[in-house]
Image: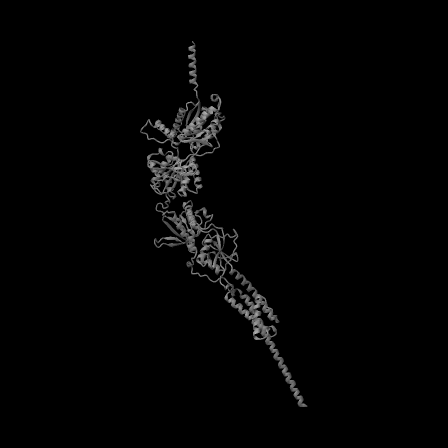
């Protein structure tokens, strides 16, 4: 009987042990699209991870039990599955949302229920919910490496190709930001739907073909990438001169592509998730091959999806975290038992295990199949990214992009200088050299360049005919700058120059409009960069000095400069009047004024001294005649006007006309050929017809014979005038940075604008631009045009003072006439008195004689 009781007790204990196993089962949900081979691979890796982990750790007191749900590729289905798992199955964690949309849907649920969600989404998202853990490597980490690679190739423009989905558009934004940080211009972003037809893709590739940029960065799914590469090869975009960079979204599944797709991708460079070689990874691959492909020896083996490796390590980390929670939380068995009676994981409730499980997940750190597993701020720690080159039937490793922001040939040898950079890359077309140029000439087209040729400044820009080809070509400073910069790009493209003349009624704004309407590809010459014009075309950086300058006449360096203020006829007239004054004063004063009497020499000296002293108002001889005083008064007034004018004119000849230009006070800008120069007369804007300033000759005429003191225009125009005419006569006396200088105009969005800007900057740095400026804008007096020779500087002439001399002359002549009349009258009166006296004397004598005779 006791034995029977013992047996019954043993059977009872055994049955209870079978009913209640020694470990605790923790429900975990798995949400995947089970309809695709990739997702089935991920689920297979998850189940394999649990099997391997608990085989090694059979002593663990907990076991994860999977509850899978199929989303069928629908985000709302994923949300419904998560609700079911939380409410009915009461899972303690969820694994699997692979798309960013599904992850964001589940993020809200995880926060409400305090359930960790292990997301396989590779796109970034906010870390506002600590329960959302990203166990897959963030795909945006590679964008910085792609931008660094493009920068190392010295390419400045790229074209992006992404999927036309919410995730694709978001990733395009991240890539544009990465390129902008490296000063790389994204010429165009092509968004293509995964369901796009072959005709649509073909038309899109033809559009890209005409955009002249041949560096493409692709971020698409493997299926779309396969179609794109096949058609790109068909239209000739996989040949020499083209570059393709593919992200991990395609290269991670390169082994899943067919042979034809791989063949069409030859020469492409890809960024791929990297897993360091280890015994764990080797054993995992062998087991994967054995379990999934041993049953069909004729099936081609494909590499494991990186998401499967990340899921494998994440499940192992979750199992470790669950076990740690079991050992750290007392009476866990009671908590698990309560799950049957209490709803602890509903949306309105919270999981009593979730917070502890999350904390343990963030602490887990181990070397797994994919390398070191460690979460930081809810994300897997970024690892090195492998750089591959598609060659032959697969890919060839050329290096790595590491987190420190460098390229290296091998991991773990960072101190070796020979390890920096990448291995040799074989580009499309089988070339080993990095393509240095783009193919600008497409379908027999030429680069059409428009040149403003208004003829006024031939040393700046001029259209000439090449005697060798009999085709128009550009000459002058602007033409040479364009040729040097464009030839440095090494495109080897035929250029077709077209003359744009003023005679045809054209203006600079009309020229810009032709570029905007895409009638021409570019325009070169003396084209001022303005904000308004930049709305319609893209300008290069300035090739000239910024701002405007003032052109004025120089001072006369001659030792006889004091003669220059007065013209010869004015000098002669003044001297003649001075001598006439001297004679007039002597004529009036010498008979009655003792100071003008004496010997002939004394009279001449005194008279000349008096006349000359009137020039400085220092005459001291006393004039006794009112007539003399009147003449001298009028003459002194004439002398006052002459001396004041002489002093002012001599001052302007001794110094360069300095015209103060206050910032912003001069608003003139030479935007059109019929209004290039602004002229100043007495420091004010003159009423001068602008069409007279079409050429450098007009500038000189305005300064020398037009009566103007200065001309204000862009600095390069003034330098052109100084080059064509004697720099000894004119000077650039003041500048003001109120314009942006000259630049070359290109069609809006053309990458040539930025590339030409880079070459122009190089020309400025190495001194070539200065040499070209010296060639065309200095010492070019032999290029004088229009048969114009500089006349004498503007001086005072007799014509301007004829009124003064008329007044003085009339006064002198009147005084002389009055004096003569007075003398004649005086002499006549003297003669009359003598005759009377003589008559009286004769009469008195006669009477006296008669009286004597009478006596």
Q: Nearer the viewer, residue 600 or 538?
A: 600
Q: Quadrant of the N terminus?
A: top left
Q: In this figure, which colouring scheme has been used for the structure?
A: one colour
Can residue 194 be spotted in the picture?
no
Residue 470 in view (yes/no): yes
Q: How many marks?
A: 0
Indicate the position of residue 278 as horizontal and vertical percent values. 38, 31
Relative to 845, does residue 286 appear above or below in the rendering? Answer: above
Percent x, y for residue 587?
58, 73
Give the quarter of the image for residue 787: bottom left
Q: Closest to the observer: 811 or 229?
A: 229
Residue 579 is situated, as x and y percent measured from the top left of the image, at: 55, 70
**The furthest residue to the top:** 1
Q: Is residue 593 above or below residue 410?
A: below
Where is residue 402 drawn, in percent x and y? Answer: 42, 37
Residue at the far front: name it. 415
The residue shown at (35%, 33%) is 255
* As drawn, 24 above or below 388: above
Which of the 4 image quarters holds residue 63?
A: top left
Residue farthest left in this picture: 298
Q: Quadrant of the C terminus?
A: bottom right
Q: Nearer the viewer, residue 576 or 512?
A: 576
Question: In the image, is 47 to the left or to the right of 591?
Answer: left
């Amino acid at each position: 009987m006791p034995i029977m009781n013992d047996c019954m007790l043993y059977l009872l204990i055994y049955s209870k042990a079978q009913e209640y196993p020694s470990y605790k089962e923790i429900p975990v949900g798995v949400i995947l699209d089970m309809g695709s081979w990739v997702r089935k691979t991920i689920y297979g890796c998850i189940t394999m991870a649990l099997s391997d982990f608990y085989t090694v750790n059979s002593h663990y007191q907990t076991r994860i039990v999977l509850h899978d749900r199929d989303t069928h590729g629908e985000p709302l289905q994923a949300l419904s599955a998560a609700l079911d798992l939380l409410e009915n199955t009461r899972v303690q964690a969820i694994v699997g949302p692979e798309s960013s949309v599904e992850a964001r849907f589940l993020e809200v649920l995880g926060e409400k229920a305090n359930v960790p969600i292990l997301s396989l989404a590779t796109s970034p998202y906010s870390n506002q919910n600590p329960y959302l853990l990203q166990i897959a490597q963030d795909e945006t980490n590679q964008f910085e490496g792609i931008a660094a690679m493009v920068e190392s190739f010295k390419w400045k423009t790229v074209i992006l190709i992404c999927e036309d989905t919410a995730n694709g558009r978001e990733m395009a934004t991240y890539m544009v930001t990465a390129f902008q940080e490296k000063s790389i211009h994204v010429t165009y972003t092509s968004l293509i739907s995964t369901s796009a037809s072959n005709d649509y893709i073909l038309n899109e590739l033809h559009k890209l073909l005409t955009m002249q940029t041949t560096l493409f960065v692709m971020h698409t799914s493997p299926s779309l990438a396969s179609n794109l590469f096949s058609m790109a090869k068909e239209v000739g975009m996989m040949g020499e001169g083209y570059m393709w960079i593919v992200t991990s979204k395609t290269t991670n599944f390169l082994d899943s592509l067919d042979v034809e797709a791989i063949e069409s991708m030859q020469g492409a460079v890809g960024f791929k998730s990297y897993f360091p070689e280890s015994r764990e990874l080797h054993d995992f691959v062998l087991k994967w091959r054995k379990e999934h492909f041993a049953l069909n020896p004729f099936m081609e083996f494909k590499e494991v999806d990186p998401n499967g490796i990340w899921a494998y390590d994440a499940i192992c980390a979750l199992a470790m975290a669950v076990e740690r929670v079991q050992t750290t939380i007392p009476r866990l068995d009671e908590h698990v038992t309560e799950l049957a009676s209490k709803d602890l994981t509903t949306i309105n409730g919270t999981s009593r295990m979730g917070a502890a499980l999350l904390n343990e997940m963030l602490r887990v750190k181990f070397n797994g199949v994919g390398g070191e597993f460690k979460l930081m701020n809810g994300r897997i720690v970024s690892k090195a990214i492998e750089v591959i080159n598609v060659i032959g039937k697969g890919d060839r490793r050329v290096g790595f992009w590491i987190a420190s922001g460098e390229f290296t040939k091998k991991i773990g040898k960072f101190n070796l200088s020979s390890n920096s950079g990448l291995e040799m890359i074989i580009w499309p077309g089988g070339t080993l050299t990095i393509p240095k140029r783009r193919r600008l000439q497409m379908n027999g087209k030429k680069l059409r360049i428009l040149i403003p040729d208004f003829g006024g400044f031939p040393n700046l820009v001029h259209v000439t005919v090449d005697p060798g080809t009999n085709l128009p070509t550009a000459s002058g400073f602007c033409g040479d700058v364009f040729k040097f910069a464009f030839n440095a790009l090494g495109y080897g493209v035929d250029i077709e120059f077209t003359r744009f003349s003023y005679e045809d009624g054209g203006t600079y704004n009309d020229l810009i409009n032709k570029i905007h309407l895409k009638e021409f590809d570019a325009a070169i010459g003396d084209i001022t960069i303005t904000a308004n014009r930049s709305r319609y075309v893209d300008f290069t950086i300035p090739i000239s000095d910024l701002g405007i300058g003032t052109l004025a006449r120089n001072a006369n360096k001659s030792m006889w400069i004091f003669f220059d203020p007065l013209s010869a006829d004015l000098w002669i007239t003044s001297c003649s009047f001075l001598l006439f004054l001297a004679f007039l004063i002597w004529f009036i004063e010498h008979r009655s004024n003792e100071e003008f009497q004496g010997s002939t020499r004394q009279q001449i000296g005194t008279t000349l001294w008096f006349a000359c002293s009137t020039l400085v108002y220092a005459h001291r001889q006393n004039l006794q005649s009112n007539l003399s005083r009147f003449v001298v008064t009028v003459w002194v007034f004439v002398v006052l006007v002459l001396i004041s004018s002489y002093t002012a004119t001599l001052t302007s000849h001794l110094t360069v006309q300095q015209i103060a230009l206050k910032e912003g006070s001069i608003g003139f800008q030479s935007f059109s050929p019929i209004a290039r120069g602004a002229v100043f007369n007495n420091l004010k804007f003159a009423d001068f017809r602008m069409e007279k300033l079409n050429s450098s000759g007009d500038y000189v005429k305005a300064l020398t014979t037009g009566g103007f003191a200065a001309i204000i225009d862009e600095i390069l125009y003034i330098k052109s005038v100084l080059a064509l005419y004697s720099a000894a006569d004119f000077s650039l006396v003041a500048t003001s940075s109120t314009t942006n200088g000259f630049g070359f105009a290109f069609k809006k969005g053309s990458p040539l604008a930025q590339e030409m800007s880079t070459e122009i900057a190089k020309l400025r740095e190495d001194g070539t631009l200065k040499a070209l400026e010296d060639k065309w804008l200095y010492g070019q007096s032999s290029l004088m045009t229009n048969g114009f020779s500089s006349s004498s500087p503007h001086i005072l002439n007799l014509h301007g003072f004829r009124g003064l001399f008329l007044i003085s002359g009339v006064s002198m002549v009147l005084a002389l006439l009055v004096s003569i009349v007075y003398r004649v009258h005086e002499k006549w009166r003297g003669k009359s008195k003598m005759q009377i006296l003589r008559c009286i004397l004769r009469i008195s004598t006669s009477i006296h004689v008669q009286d004597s005779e009478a006596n």
